[in-house]
Image: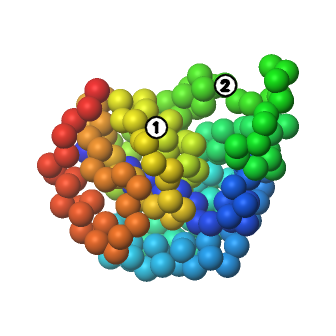
Amino acid sequence: MLHLWLVRHGQTDWNVERRLQGWTDIPLNSTGQAEADELGAALATVSFCHIYTSPLRRALETAERIQVYVGAPLTCDDRLKERGFGRLEGRVRGEDRETEPDVGVEADEAVRIRIQSFLEDTAKRHSTGRLLVVTHGGIIRMCLSMFGHTLAEPLDNASVTAIQMSQGRAHIHLVNARSPLFRQAATDRESSAMPTD
């Protein structure tokens, strides 16, 4: 079985300001750096065979800081980038959006296609083991929705969502976990999660 531990990147200044980041390459702030280090330390005794990350700086730096603790090889994958928001990037969430249709926002279906492509390729490359996937809130939320899970609350920075992949089905262990206890909770649930189609 393949276990995917999805991590949302650490905090950025634009997270604090509630701005849409999309493909704009915003770095971690000092809080985000500390969050990544804290998460890395919490994961130090968990065995990962590989780390995959979005190439955007906020995710890549999170992944690199975690890698110091877990020691697994790291690969950037463009398919893990956040949804592109076009001309809306940099706007504060909740601001009035432009009414014209072509503002460059990446379509839901385009995001699904690249996530599905990543999942399929990853399953071929790693039939078993535990992978750490450092990405973005929109990607994790879309991934969960593809497995029939609706997430009501926002995803926290540096949170962990754990999914087990087996024979084309997903078993969701943990969603949006920040507690120091998440590591034990996730490993305990890897053999007892409820399946979803």
- Secondary structure under tag 2 reads loop
Q: Name the quarter where the C terminus is drawn.
A: top left
Residue 101 visible somewhere in the drawing: yes
Q: Are marks 1 and 2 in contact (CB under 8 Å)?
A: no
Q: What is the distance, in whole Å, between disc 1 and disc 2 at their CAs?
A: 15 Å
Could you tell me which residue is drawn at 76 percent across and 42 percent down?
A: 95
Q: Residues within 10 Å of mark 1 (few under 14, many from 20)?
A: many
Q: Nearer the viewer, residue 23 or 64?
A: 23
Residue beneath disc 1: 143
- Secondary structure under tag 1 reads helix
List the single residue furthest toward the top.
Answer: 101
Could you tell me which residue is drawn at 65 percent across and 44 percent down?
A: 82
In the displayed structure, would residue 125 be above or below residue 169? below
Residue beneath disc 2: 107
Could you tell me which residue is drawn at 40 percent across and 66 percent down?
A: 178
x and y percentages locating residue 104 in the rendered image: 80, 29
Total marks in image: 2
Q: Nearer the viewer, residue 118 or 98?
A: 98
List the single residue furthest toward the left.
Answer: 192
Amino acid type of the residue that numbered disc 2 sits on in the rendered structure: Ala
Q: Residues within 10 Å of mark 2 (few under 14, many from 20)?
A: few
x and y percentages locating residue 145 in the rendered image: 43, 33
**Quadrant of the image occupied by residue 157:** bottom right
Classify residue 101 as left or right of residue 34: right
Could you tell me which residue is drawn at 85 percent across and 21 percent down?
A: 100
x and y percentages locating residue 107 in the rendered image: 66, 25
Amino acid type of the residue that numbered disc 1 sits on in the rendered structure: Cys
